Image (cartoon, coloured by chain):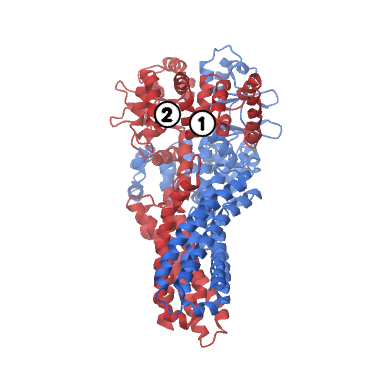
Chain colours: A blue, B red
Amino acid sequence: MPAEAQPQSYRFADTLKRLLRRNAGPAIRKILRRTHPVDLAHVMGRFLIQEQLKLLPNVGDDERQAEVVASMAMTDVEALLHEMPTERAVAVLSAMSADDRTDIMGAVDEELAGRLLSAMPDAESHEVAELLRYDEATAGGIMSPEFIAIPQDTTAAEAIAMVQDSADVEMAFYLYVVNEHGVLSGVLSLRQLVISRPAKAISEVMDPHVLSVRTDEDQEEVARIVSRYDLLAVPVVDDTNKLVGVVTVDDVLDVVREEATEDILKMAGAGEQFEDRPTVLGSLWRRAPWLAVAWVGGIAASFVIGRFEGTLQKYVVLAAFIPIIVGMAGNVGTQTLAVVVRGLATRRIDVKQFWKVVGREMAVGVLLGLAFGAALGGMGFVEVRSEPGVNALMMAGVIGAAAAISMVIAATMGSVMPLILARLRVDPAVATGPFVTTAIDVVGVAVYFNIVVFFL
Amino acid sequence: MPAEAQPQSYRFADTLKRLLRRNAGPAIRKILRRTHPVDLAHVMGRFLIQEQLKLLPNVGDDERQAEVVASMAMTDVEALLHEMPTERAVAVLSAMSADDRTDIMGAVDEELAGRLLSAMPDAESHEVAELLRYDEATAGGIMSPEFIAIPQDTTAAEAIAMVQDSADVEMAFYLYVVNEHGVLSGVLSLRQLVISRPAKAISEVMDPHVLSVRTDEDQEEVARIVSRYDLLAVPVVDDTNKLVGVVTVDDVLDVVREEATEDILKMAGAGEQFEDRPTVLGSLWRRAPWLAVAWVGGIAASFVIGRFEGTLQKYVVLAAFIPIIVGMAGNVGTQTLAVVVRGLATRRIDVKQFWKVVGREMAVGVLLGLAFGAALGGMGFVEVRSEPGVNALMMAGVIGAAAAISMVIAATMGSVMPLILARLRVDPAVATGPFVTTAIDVVGVAVYFNIVVFFL
């Protein structure tokens, strides 16, 4: 049960370390052979490279070693491959699926990649070079070039023989049918093949309405297609509609997870993705630019308030309401942003519905503004009542109105900004959080003090 | 190509509406038959119920109609089933997979559910009742009870015959092997079966190390297992290890997407999920509670500032720096929160590493605080220099120190709060955004004015 393997991993690693110190080969082998390669991959990072080198051969055959390495964190893989004898590294890489092999070759440093590529069989190194041409975040970048392509004039019996011969294709549940030029012409499931009469022509069994994506299709769009149509894999074709690869649902699942993480981190202005080994300096580097944006906005807000120093001198109690007015607007802005950015990402919101979305969000902002503005006005009246020389009712009205108006503006900005970005084909998640909250800070204080000056 | 179907959907719906008005049956049928059921489901919401009732029979046989209905928004499904003749509704539901059918029966109102269930074949209504017993967000709630279970003493040839006979099992790529009590004992892929010698016993071909989940396993954990081990499906077993269902990867993909949306919306305090038909009042209702939290915090902040009215009266320029000090701290807090909450959700951060995570985030906070505190102090010096009766250097130091300290506190709160929630087994995303930013607002002004009073 994997559910148990994970919590135990500290203890698991400790046990292995003890056995390594004792050079207890057979015991190590016994433990490693009965553990899932993915679980082994997750504990590998806890060992020194020299220990990893000792552990790996005990995991099992090249296939199993490849499964472990393919699931390890990329920085660990790079370090490990550096220290492995070239022929062992190549053997493990060869036992991997082509897409995993390519991901690794694209991520390690050039010297290492060059050394390994030149030691690989020509067919494999060519394949890696071919695949590395595609942008990482496209269908071509995540596809596997290993698939079963059946010529359309084959019979069911011949097709079954082809499946039996193609041992190293991962997850063969869809079989793709191609014409004499390798152009994709249909699809059938392994199961449909099994149920077909042996003499039947594949072209009669297959479904000619096969969904496919182009090599340059964005991986998010590939994920959307796979999840929309509940597919297990989607074939990838080149400009001439020739079948060149397959994206399987397990890779799509990774894409969906990564994109969600990216959206969350981007919205908060905290980078784009998690690092394998997070460092304090790395975090600093990723977060500082967005804080700099907020800093500039804050300075702008301080200049705005500075302009109203005379007013503040007269009604110093006004200062007490700066955080709540700015804060409420910021919260409404964040709520609106989250709904619109995620709505766009999941295609629940269509960029074309600009006015519908903005109108709805503004309506929500107006109602929230009225409710919380009134509440703040009431509270303001209580706080201000005892101040000397102040028209408490007027003051309360001003505070409430400022809160309400800045909340409406915040809801408007929170919906307009991501929609405009999406129209410009910029990812609407790009640190919209810091941008919008900062803009709201400035607008909030400006609204507040202008209303104050106007009415008092 | 699905990529084209979606943008066209406005025009697509308009064309269909025109044909409906003209009663152009054959033309409608032609269009509907060549459109993917999922695409049809997505445009159905644009039609009146009476139009939907006319369109549905033209989609194709019951299977295809079922595919359309199963992919429609639940509120539309409910409205449509209400208006459909009972026997048609039951025919369409019967043509659906059991998990889709159960989702619908669990979502529609009781009167409708009762009417449809009593009109269904007994076997189906019993199955629905069985499945509805499981919590929606567990393995039992998302599993399909249709799977191919092969007795372990079968031969490969007999197993192939079983696959050929079980036509209505969706996505049969794994075959599960059970003992005489129905207890799960192994797994093999359809492909392994196809390559096996016909006379070979299944127990020799299967992999006895089969991963499974219990019916009450949380759907997020199921999703994590499927994506960790790159599975296409995971078998679900009851307390006695008896195989009762299968969760397929397409359902897992939906879970991953929904959970990510939930995290984003929760963090922003904007509800938990998108509504099928978002309404202004619904949004109001979901967002108001979190704004109320922020409101209370804002009032607290205003009382804190109120206590320092004398100080503010003397140094009114201090008010200008309230938004930037509170804002910078808020931004650091949000960044930290996003990293920690998402890290916990994706298991990149382990709750047990409490001090490691908090220490790291505090270190980042200290460095960011030093950098931006110094910058703000410098800027403050420039702004304050010309004020009469103010020690500009002292004032600048105070402003910078206040910014730095509140940023460190913000980083600490942003990491401690979600970790504590996770330890208490509460979802760390629960509107941590509004809670933390509000707490930071109060702490920020308190730090600021206390430092001011101490030094000036």
Residue A454 versus residue B83 in the image, above or below: below
Of the pair B302 and B399, the residue shown nearer to us: B302
B16 on left or right of B436? right
The dot on residue B71 is 1
A186 on left or right of B400? right
Label 1: chain letter: B
Of the pair B131 and B366, the residue shown nearer to us: B131
Q: Mark 2 = which residue?
A: B99
A265 on left or right of B4? left
Q: Residue furthest left?
A: B240
Residue A178 versus residue B142 in the image, above or below: above
Residue A407 versus residue A243 in the image, above or below: below
Of the pair B237 and A230, the residue shown nearer to us: A230
Label 2: chain letter: B
Mark 1–mark 2 CB contact (< 8 Å): no
| Amino acid type, residue under disc 2 in the picture | Asp
The dot on residue A183 is none
Residue A293, percent from left and from top: 57, 64
